[in-house]
Amino acid sequence: MQTASPNLEVLVIGRSIQGLGVGFLSMTVPVIQAEIAPGHARGVFVTIENLFLNAGFSLSTWVGYAFYSYMPSEMAWRGSYIVFTGTSLVLLVGTVFLPETPRWLIKNGFHQEGLATLADLQDASATSDEDVNRTYKEIVSAIEFEHQQGGDSTWTEIFTRYTRRTVMAVTSQMFAQLNGINAILYFLPENLIRAGFDVPKSLLYTGVSSTMLIVGIIPTIYLVDTLGRRALLIIGGIGMALCLAIVGGLQFHVDNLESTSPQLSSAAKGIFACICLYLAFFAFSWGPVPWLIPAEVFPLRARARGMALATGSNWFWDFVIAFATPPLSQSLRGGIYFIIVGFVTTSVLLVLLVYRETAGTTLEELSEVFGDTPFVNVRSVSVPDMKEARSSMHMSPKERSMSAVFRSPSMNMDPTSIEPI
């Protein structure tokens, strides 16, 4: 619709439908990543997802620059949509072959399929593998405990029973926006023009700066599960605040220069350099981690609602930033960067005072991090029949999931024979 739109109305309708799709994906994908990852490497999985997100954003800036520079008239903007339609089709086709997660399968009564999928994910040759069985028992124990608590959580419980988790999930997504990333990226060409660059160079430098999102996130892949989530957010926040403060100061300096001043070029280059460093620090910390936190902190019974609430927070503040940034930039000039510095400082203090460290634990063990009542004794959980599970392992992951979907699910936990502690 956007590629072939004959007028603005059709373009807006297509854009709105695309927005709904992005909203669904932004809520679902981090949950899938968190549920399939082992406890010691959960951060790596979600960070790798963000690496590809950043690479996709960087690609989009270069595609936009290429069509602007080399394609005439309307193809300067329609061409980008043609490319992005192709990448969306790749995503659609890949999703067809995506299996359900073990936690979803087990929760819905498909124990053999869930056990076999766990073995696939942990690269185990047999479902009797010790790590596979232990993870299976933890999942079943957590699900049975949550079933005893009344099944899926209510919205009231999200705010009352899981208060700290909700605060972490919602505020991490909120500050991912208020810490300035889209206030800068959405209007980066305009900001670079205001800093002293011409239009072609501002578009070129926008593409160059976007590569810093890829460079910055690479160390996170190796550090997110060793240093932990809190350390990354704090270090990244401090680096972002320093870079933004310098950008704000330089912008005030540029605004007081004549257009013919020899200092204009060096000041503009200084602004660009600090923006690149800011993007690297953001990609290192407040880019990937806020997508990891809400996907992992909620128990299974509250994960869908919790992730939806956190994602809604992200897009709400994204909407506010998109509309508030142009008038604020126009009136405050370099002062807007110091407002963002204030938000970054607040977010670092919140991490220090409120956030709990979640690295290095399975999703089921996180209940202890937040002081929840232990669920059940995993030693009392029996594993499904090995013959049936091995038979399921001979199926492809997608065939296994489809088999589960077309069977009648049962939430009865027998024959697991779970006994409370």
Image (cartoon, rainbow, N blue to C red):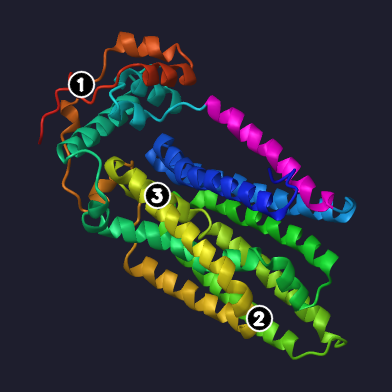
User: Please, what secondary structure does the residue beneath circle 3 have?
Assistant: helix
Which of the two discs, 1 and 2, sits closer to the camera? 2
In the picture, the quarter occupied by the C terminus is top left
- Relative side of 378 to 404, left or right: left
Q: CA distance from mark 2 to mark 3?
A: 34 Å
Magenta stretch secondary structure, dominant: helix
At 63% across and 84% down in the image, what residue appears? 331
**Residue 160, quarter of picture:** bottom left
Q: Earlier in the sequence, mark 2 or mark 3?
A: 3
Determine which of the numbered discs, if any, sits on residue 330 in the image.
2
Q: How far apart are the two marked residues, 1 and 2, measured between alpha carbons? A: 65 Å
Residue of label 1: 382
Left/right of residue 131 with respect to residue 278 in the rendered view: left
- Of residues 346 and 3, which is closer to you in this image? 3
- Which percent across, then down, holds residue 77? 78, 52
* Magenta stretch holds residue 330: no
Query: Tag 1, which secondary structure?
Result: loop
Residue 29: x and y in percent read: 48, 41
